[in-house]
Image: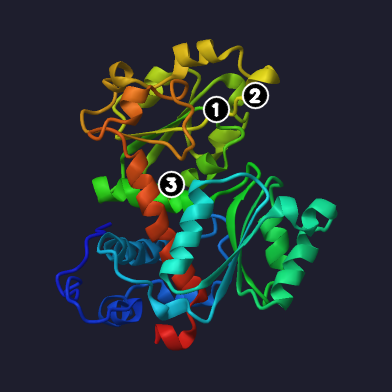
Amino acid sequence: MNLQIRDDMPDLSMSTPLSLDALSSNLMLDTPGVDLWRARRHLLDTKDLTKVEVECALRFAAVCKKLCQLEIAPLPVLNSKVVANIFYENSTRTRSSFELAARRLGATVLNLDVQSSSVAKGETLLDTAQTLIAMGVHAIVQRHASSGSAHRLSEAFHDKVHVLNAGDGWNAHPTQGLLDLFTMLEVMPDLCGAKVAIVGDISHSRVARSNIWLLKLFGAHIHLAGPPTLMPPEISKLGVTVHNQLEPAIEDADFVIALRIQLERQKKGEIPSLSEYKKLYRLDHHRLKLAKPTARVLHPGPVNRGVELTDHLADDPELSLIRTQVANGVAVRMAVLYLLLASKEAKS
């Protein structure tokens, strides 16, 4: 998939006012998938996205990334919309990038402090959403520890609000999957036949699941590696290859995605010790030599430095795509918000 801006794109360096509408009218209206996004109300998972929809979103993301790089002023394309961020779990990258994405599209952003809200008094998820909808919120970006919480919210208020899943339990993290895919496609425009290794705590990783669905959609061969206690017993049914050892998983890999080890798992006895995990599964420059010479490393963050990968590898600009992932997160979330929230008038 070619994510490069086409030659017929307007001059983005010009001083005249520029909007995403102007760009889309010149570039994007003929993009397959726009109508599918118009009909879609929510983004809950990656497994229900078609390849056409994914390609459409990533082409918009490429335009949004260019706008971000040029530091163009916020665009008024969502200036009539209100986006609420409700994060029942801690977050830096996802919450901040959703806020930046919405503001760069001109939306009003409400960040709900769960700890000081009525949630702390026992208010339910659905009651909180109902309150926000009554106040005129158009979209809810939600992270919650319960798998399926985003689906329940969308079912309860299907026609009243757009729901964007920012992570629900171990189930899904669709925008992380999209930004990871976007980042890989910038390096390798065709992932068909590419080998992608995902290493670490697969059992408790919503990122792994979202990535698996998207990577399969684009023809990649997916290899998983991690301690047996952190590997779902039937994960191979998703069409992936499972390894208990790191080396065969990353051998000849084009990309290696390291997952965060939740340190509380050690307290529960799911990993013997951090020192043993590092000995068997930590990525470093030496181990990465097993992968292809052009291989790149990703990590959804936050990184437990020295555990999932060494500091030297995490900060190596030639091998690590971690900072690129963070930057791409804003562009991808801009694209998704625009495709879901922009009025039909703005899209036509």
Q: Residue at x 58, y 27 (%)?
A: 231
The image quarter containing residue 263 is: top right
* Amino acid, disc 3: Lys
Mark 1 surroundings: few (<14), some (14-19) or many (≥20) residues within 10 A: many
* Amino acid, disc 1: Ile
Mark 2 surroundings: few (<14), some (14-19) or many (≥20) residues within 10 A: some
Task: Return the x and y of residue 309 as percentages of the image width and height.
Answer: 40, 24
Depth order, front residue of 12/146: 12
Task: Return the x and y of residue 154 as percentages of the image width and height.
Answer: 68, 66
Position of 93 with respect to 19 (left or right) is: right
Q: Is residue 174 shown to the viewer in this render?
A: no
Q: Residue at x 49, y 39 (%)?
A: 239
Residue farthest front in this picture:
116
Q: Which mark is residue 261?
A: 1
Q: Label 1 near label 2: C-beta < 8 Å?
A: yes
Depth order, front residue of 201/81: 81
Give the distance between the C-alpha atoms of the residues marked 2 and 1, in whole angstroms. Answer: 8 Å
Q: Label 3 near label 1: C-beta < 8 Å?
A: no
Task: Return the x and y of residue 106 as percentages of the image width and height.
Answer: 45, 74
Q: Which mark is residue 216?
A: 3
